[in-house]
Image: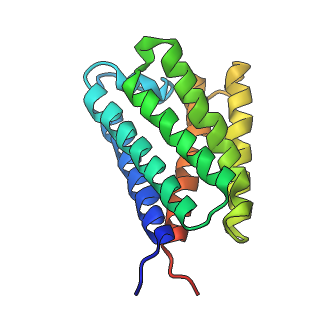
Amino acid sequence: MTYTNKTYAGVLLFLGTAWFLMGIVISEALYPGYHITQMISDLGVGSTALVYNSSIIVFGVMLIAAAYLLRLAGTDIWFSALMALIGIGALGVGIFPENTGTPHVISALIVFIFGGVVAIMSFRVFPVPWAWFSGALGIITLAAIILLGAKCYLGLGAGGMERMIAYPLILWALGSGAFLMAPAK
């Protein structure tokens, strides 16, 4: 089997996302007294900072590399550019933990907002039904951003609502990575 730039992009997207997800899970388990109603970025400060911040930095680097490979493969320029921007935002989240204030908030907003947009834009890259699922995940993310901004947590707490932003994006990235790795027919 011949591997293409899309295949390698899928590998990077899948591995980077899985690495980040495991970084979250490990950090949540190791952080003293942590509860999922707390913000995810709380994990980037204190005893779990090394695990969490390094995992999101690796995620950001792999997203940027995947975006580059997708562009080389002829993928839509806007999709590739926004994916690279998400990677830059993820790098920012890891480099600027939440206790740095504004740089962290800007970086997180880049990941969340453009992540939702890229998931919706998946119709430019993926066929149905994955394009439909991707769009739905993007809409959930963007709706949850609005709810979090309005402090309407629906009983989930701020951290739970933040997970309604982040986890659909994680699912989208894992699924998209797997889709890109699949052999072309």
Q: Position of residue 124 (x, y in %)?
A: 72, 62
Q: Check the picture and name the quadrant holding the C terminus.
A: bottom right
Q: Nearer the viewer, residue 18 or 77?
A: 77
Left or right side of 17 for 122: right
Residue sitting at x 44%, y 18%: 98
Left or right side of 79 for 70: left
Q: Nearer the viewer, residue 28 or 64?
A: 64
- Residue 6 visible in the shown view: yes
Q: Position of residue 49 (x, y in %)?
A: 30, 26
Q: Check the picture and name the quadrant holding the N terminus.
A: bottom left
Q: Is residue 32 above or below residue 5?
A: above
Q: Position of residue 90 (x, y in %)?
A: 47, 36
- Residue 168 visible in the shown view: no
Q: Nearer the viewer, residue 21 or 86?
A: 86
Q: Is residue 97 above or below residue 68?
A: above
Quadrant housing residue 147: top right
Q: Nearer the viewer, residue 131 or 67?
A: 67
Quadrant housing residue 93: top left
Residue sitting at x 42%, y 67%: 8
Residue sitting at x 66%, y 35%: 113
Q: Is residue 64 above or below residue 112?
A: below
